[in-house]
């Protein structure tokens, strides 16, 4: 059976912390960014103190190795990202609007059908400006406003 995790003192900030259960035997630093940075620096320092690691990436052997790699991979660090592919659809062509008579379909429809065909914002605006709240009243006002708009745009048909 495992022993319960005990708190440990961080070697950098000297505060108590609970180590991660997966690395409890090796964790000596807490998880704050400053302590993680100190842990990394200490780890690198320990690695470089070993005689076999002191000149691991320096010297004429490594210079020649890097030179050969660069010759085999010219322009590696200068490559640009791959171009974005085009969309998989064809561009749409504009179409001419179809002329429809404005009075077509205006008849004695069911009140709910006429009422809900209007935009809810438009209905709310009419109700707000007119102070009406019943559907019958808003529908009648909507028809009057629609006729007024037609008269303004296309000329009044019933002028005395």
Image: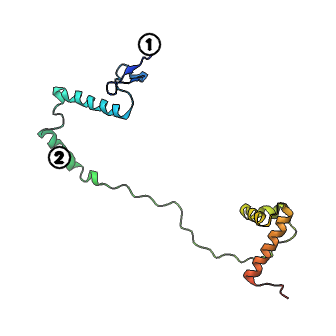
The residues bearing labels 2 and 1 have C-alpha atoms spaced at a distance of 53 Å
Q: Nearer the viewer, residue 66 or 151?
A: 151
Circle 1 is placed at which residue position?
3
Q: Give the residue drawn at x 35%, y 26%.
A: 29
**Quadrant position of the C terminus in the picture:** bottom right
In this view, the residue in front, 119 or 36, is: 36
Furthest residue to the bottom? Answer: 160
Q: Position of residue 42 (x, y in %)?
A: 26, 29
Q: Which mark is residue 141?
A: none
The residue lying at 36 percent from left, 55 percent from top is 81
- Residue 74 position within the rendered picture, expressed as x and y whole percent measured from the top left: 23, 52
Query: Please, which colouring scheme is shown?
Result: rainbow
So how many labels did they put on this image?
2
Q: Earlier in the sequence, mark 2 or mark 1?
A: 1
Q: Which residue is mark 2?
A: 67
Residue 39 visible here:
yes
């Amino acid at each position: 059976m495992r022993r319960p995790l005990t708190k440990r003192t961080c070697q950098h900030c000297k505060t108590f912390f609970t180590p991660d259960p997966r690395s409890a035997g090796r964790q000596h630093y807490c998880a704050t960014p400053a302590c993680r940075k100190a842990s990394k620096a200490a780890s690198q320092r320990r690695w470089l103190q070993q005689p076999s690691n002191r000149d691991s990436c320096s010297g004429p052997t490594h210079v020649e190795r890097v030179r050969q790699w660069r010759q085999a991979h010219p322009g590696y660090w200068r490559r640009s990202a791959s171009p974005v592919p085009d969309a998989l659809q064809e561009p749409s062509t504009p179409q001419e609007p179809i002329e429809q008579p404005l009075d077509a379909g205006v008849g004695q429809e069911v009140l709910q059908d006429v009422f809900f065909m209007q935009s809810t914002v438009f209905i709310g605006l009419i109700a707000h400006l007119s102070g009406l709240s019943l559907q019958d009243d808003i529908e009648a006002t909507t028809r009057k406003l629609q006729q007024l708009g037609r008269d303004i745009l296309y000329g009044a048909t019933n002028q005395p």
